[in-house]
Amino acid sequence: MKDLIKDTIGKIKKQHILPESKWKYLARKYGVWFLFVLVVIFGGVSLSAAAYLLSSLDWDLYNFMHQNRVGYLLSIFPYFWAVLVGTFIIGAFFDMRKTETGYRFSWLKISLVTIGSILVLGAVMFFAGLGGRFNSMMASGVPYYGQHMMVTKESQWMQPQDGFLAGTINSTSNVVLVVSDLNGKVWNVDFDENTLIRPSANVSKGQMIKIIGTQSGSDTFQATEIRPWIGGGMMGGVGGQRNGMGTGRGMMRGN
């Protein structure tokens, strides 16, 4: 024991080891916790953004795109946010291990605390509407976010060449809707008694709608189905309207 104490004292003198000041100790201690909380917050934001994207997309469009369900789900999965969530989970995990008491907990407990914290915070942010706001910020501030990095509701429904169109109704008649799409282009959307209008779709001036059909010209579109902008494709329910006349149509396509 004496030799150990002597060797330790000798090492301290040789390496010029000095006592650490209290403020440095506290800064390092609380700095690690601050970093952990920050990483958890970013993880929660990423999770809420991913949840918003998944909840806003129309999940039944694979029927109209002639794809199988699995392939379609893989094509719209928010990989960008999933990678971020995974990165933040790993970062928070190792930050927790660096805390003063982190060594006392098993890997399983730290994993549960880390993942649980991000899940809870992400759920709170999602239901508070922060996921949608953050996606809007990304779409307006990050180039190519909605075109190449991520499948968004807007990019999903701005594919007229593939039969999907969305926009705001400028004017209506018995057979034509004049619609300004999400990019500002004006379309003449033709519809007839065979066009399925979802019960919750308000086909009147100033309303936003989603349209399934066929592009028939550079600025003309033949509608086979009209949906409200708000709500996913699995939310429509049963029944429908033809030409706004309120006639039923049984089970909707895509459900």
Image (cartoon, rainbow, N blue to C red):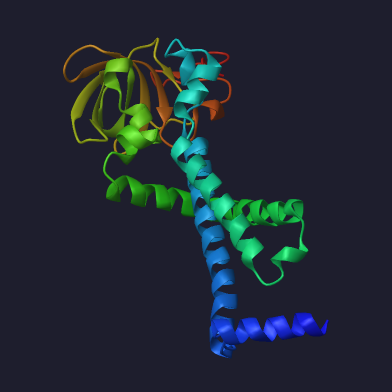
Q: Is residue 60 visible?
A: no
Q: Is residue 126 visible?
A: yes
Which residue is at a point 52% across and 48% down the rendered structure image? 87
Query: Residue 21 vs residue 198: left or right?
Result: right
Is residue 12 or residue 170 the one in the foreground? 12
Residue ranking furthest to the right: 1
Is residue 200 or residue 43 the one in the foreground? 43
Q: Position of residue 17 (x, y in %)?
A: 57, 84
The answer to which image quadrant residue 213 occupies is top left
Is residue 152 or residue 183 the one in the foreground? 152
In the image, residue 144 sits, relative to residue 163, either above or below, namely below
Residue ranking furthest to the left: 218
Is residue 34 or residue 102 the one in the foreground? 102
Query: Residue 64 vs residue 239: left or right?
Result: left
Q: Position of residue 192 (x, y in %)?
A: 34, 12
Q: Position of residue 131 (x, y in %)?
A: 48, 50
Which residue is at a point 22% across and 11% down the rendered structure image? 216
Query: Residue 34 vs residue 209: left or right?
Result: right
In the image, residue 65 sits, relative to residue 127, either above or below, namely above
Q: Position of residue 51 (x, y in %)?
A: 53, 42
